[in-house]
Image (cartoon, rainbow, N blue to C red):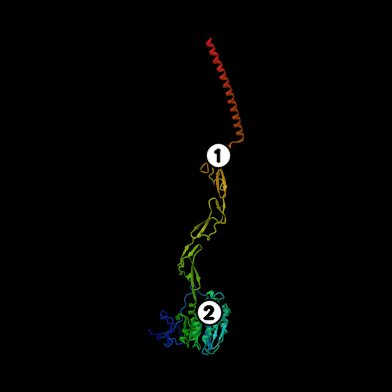
Amino acid sequence: MPLAKFGNRVGSLCLCDDTRSFLPFFATTVLETERQNKPGPNTCGEGRTASQLPLRPDTACKNRPLDLVFIVDSSRSVRPEEFEKVKTFLSEMIDTLDVGERTTRVAVMNYASTVKVEFPLRTYFDKASMKEAVSRIEPLSAGTMTGLAIQTAMEEVFTEEMGARPATFNIPKVVIVVTDGRPQDRVQDVAASARTAGIEIYAVGVDRADMQSLRIMASEPLDEHVFYVETYGVIEKLTSRFRETFCAVNVCALGTHGCQQLCVSNGASHLCDCYEGYTLNPDKRTCSAVDMCAPGRHECGQICVSNNGSYVCDCYEGYTLNPDKKTCSAQDMCAPGRHDCAQVCLSNDGSYSCGCYEGYTLNPDKKTCSGAITSSLVTTEESCKCEAIIALQDSVTSHLEALSKKLEEVSEKLQAYQERQQIV
């Protein structure tokens, strides 16, 4: 199908009901025609007009934070009523944005042969004030110095003094240029410098705008950054397309993130995270339980017991866990029922040892006792009794020895008497 059927400009396409799925969007063309039922150069086929760009559903969609600068051409070729259409487009664009000091900041620049910053990024943080300021903008009416306007945005508007956020904030810097003519200065080098500085440029051409100039100044890919409309009367229809472009789809809300545990929205993107006690694996999606009992990861005073990504504290034998569930206190191990000693229990800093009553010795099992009297256990009274017994024994022995001696003497005398009787 030849491109000529879709519009009267080379390289641009009009959006028809039967061609929406066909559009490559090198440049989006929206046509307006008053001839509703007549084929003509501004119609798409037999008697049909171009339709407005479709609007995607709002499901899980929110404008991501931007530092956004509109640069609008108000040269002599833009008639007053057309410039009013541009201001309507700006107001409707502002309505689609999440405007605020911490969200999207907006600045508007007006240019012709000179450049005027109508309001910088730091001035307004609410839509009503911003739209009121837009309504007061007046055209400058001479020249088309597009390069100068982009350079002014880069050097003056995108500065922290004028309200741009620091680079460390990672807030996208975006420019939307709206023009209906050919630049009268060297826009190519300036636009390249701006893109190198991290500024994303969208180019919107109207009516007589030079398509090659739009392509030179816009960021890549061109099919997403170059737009064209036939007249200012339909420029506001681009609002829905920019809304789609700046829409940050909340993948976490849609449930298409692929994160195993937690999904953290990050502007137009997302990051995966894990519950406490888990760590993100190298695939950046799944999680593994960490050893919470590794040194430095727990607050247990004595024993840490790992428990599926968490932990509980415990105590050594002889200690009990305090109410804080972290520290331990020594138990009285000699309390009834807590020890195995048969006679005496001696407490010893969370432990114990066994002893025996006087007159007993500790058995090898270190728990039970056996009775025994040793010299070391004899009392003073018993010692005195022993000495008396020994003295008595000595006395008896002495008397027995004396008696034995007398008996020997008697026996000898008796024997002598018997011998004399025999002689007689």
Q: Secondary structure at mark 2?
A: strand
Neighbourhood count class around disc 2 (C-alpha, 10 Å): few under 14, some 14–19, many 20 upward: many
Res 200 seen here? no
- Amino acid beneath label 1: Tyr
Residue 98 coordinates in the image, percent (x, y):
53, 76
Which is closer to the viewer, label 2 or label 1? 1
Question: The residue under label 2 is which amino acid type?
Answer: Leu
In primary-sequence order, the first of circles 2 and 1 is 2
Q: Cβ–Cβ below 8 Å for labels 2 and 1?
A: no
Task: Give the quadrant of residue 137.
Answer: bottom right
Image side of residue 280 versus residue 129, left or right: left
Q: Quadrant of the N terminus?
A: bottom left
Residue 88 circle label: none
Count of residue discs: 2
Q: Position of residue 225 (x, y in %)?
A: 47, 81
* Residue at x 60% of width, y 34% of height: 383
Residue shown at 55%/39% (left/top)? Answer: 360
Indicate whether 123 appears above or below 372.
below
Q: Quadrant of residue 5?
A: bottom left
Q: Is residue 283 left or right of residue 329?
A: left
**In the image, residue 70 lies at what x, y percent?**
53, 82
| In-front residue for pair 95/381 | 381
Identify the residue at the far top of this view. Answer: 424
Instruction: Give neighbour class at mark 1: few <14, some 14-19, many 20+ (Cα, 10 Å).
Output: some
Residue 346 seen in the figure: yes
Distance between the Cα atoms at labels 2 and 1?
96 Å
Q: In the structure shown, which secondary structural element does the residue marked by tag 1 occupy?
A: strand
Residue 95 image position (x, y, % from top left) = 53, 78
- The residue at which mark 2 appears reads as 68
Residue matched to label 1: 360
**Image vertical order of residue 393 relative to residue 310, above or below:** above
